[in-house]
Every structure is written in structure tokens, then in C-alpha cells.
Amino acid sequence: MAKGGRILVVEDEMLLAMSLEDLLVSYGFEVVGPASRIDVALRLACSEAIDAGILDLNIASEDVYPVADALAARGIPFLFITGYNASAITQKYAKRPMLQKPFKPEVLRKTLNEMMS
């Protein structure tokens, strides 16, 4: 497992954001955010040193795609987390990793490892 990377977390459900942060820290990552608004997430995605991103598909009724676009433009890998199924993801990002909520911590860890290796 990659250690020491900086992970941008974009999640508007505060309990899930805090749980994700705790989990990522336990894996040896530093969390950037978590961001619960698109404008904040976009600023972080454009300005911070980030090794990967975890993006909730829907943030306060807004699509997270502007943040995905910013990360993709920088060549930063990311995955989507969502309560929706895979068909909810726009075709442009259909091949990106996606975890459906609720997901098991070990699945997140495996997905991050694959994505960052």
C-alpha cells in the first residue's frame, strides 16, 4: 500500500467525510479537505499538492465533475463514491474507479492501492 500520499476528499455527508478521513489516516495518508462544497473542492483540486482524490458524485445537489476535470487535467488519479449505481457516472468518466455506498474499508484500500501504483 502506498503510504504518505495526500488524498483530496470531496464529501458533503459530514459523518462519512469524518469516517473517510479517519480511515485514510489509519492507512498512512494525509487528507486534503474534506471539502463539502464544489467551490472549495475545486480550489483545493487546482492549488494543493494531491496524489489522489475521492469524490462523492453529488455534492449539495451539484455534480462533482468540475473537480474531476481539474484533477484529470493535472493527471491526478481519482475515484468516485456514490449511492447511485455506475450508470449515474457520465460517459467521460465511466472507466474511472467507483465505489457504491456503503463500501467496505478493505475495498477502498485495495482500490486506492491499484489506482496509485
Image: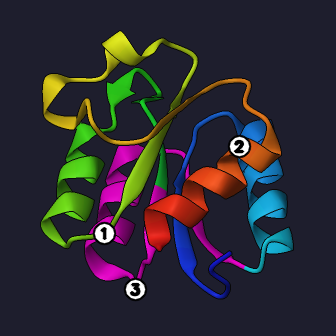
| Residue range (magenta) | 29-53
Asked if the residues shown at circle 1 and circle 2 are in contact, with their CB atoms under 8 angstroms apart, the answer is no
Query: Which amino acid is tagged 1?
Result: Ile
Of discs 2 and 3, which sits in the foreground? 2
Q: Which comes before the other along the chain, label 1 or label 3?
A: 3
Query: Which amino acid is tagged 3?
Result: Ala
Q: Is residue 86 above or below residue 9?
A: above
Would residue 34 be seen by someone viewing this image from the given angle?
no
Q: Name the spot of residue 110 as percent of width and height, x first.
A: 66, 54
Query: Which amino acid is tagged 2?
Result: Val
Q: Name the spot of residue 15 as percent of width and height, x first.
A: 81, 39
Residue to which mark 3 is pinned: 49
Q: Is residue 41 above or below residue 90?
A: below
The residue that appears at 33% across and 42% down in the rendered structure is 96
Specify the label residue 76 is tagged with: 1
Left or right: 56 with respect to 104? Answer: left
Of discs 1 and 2, which sits in the foreground? 2
The quarter holding residue 59 reads top left
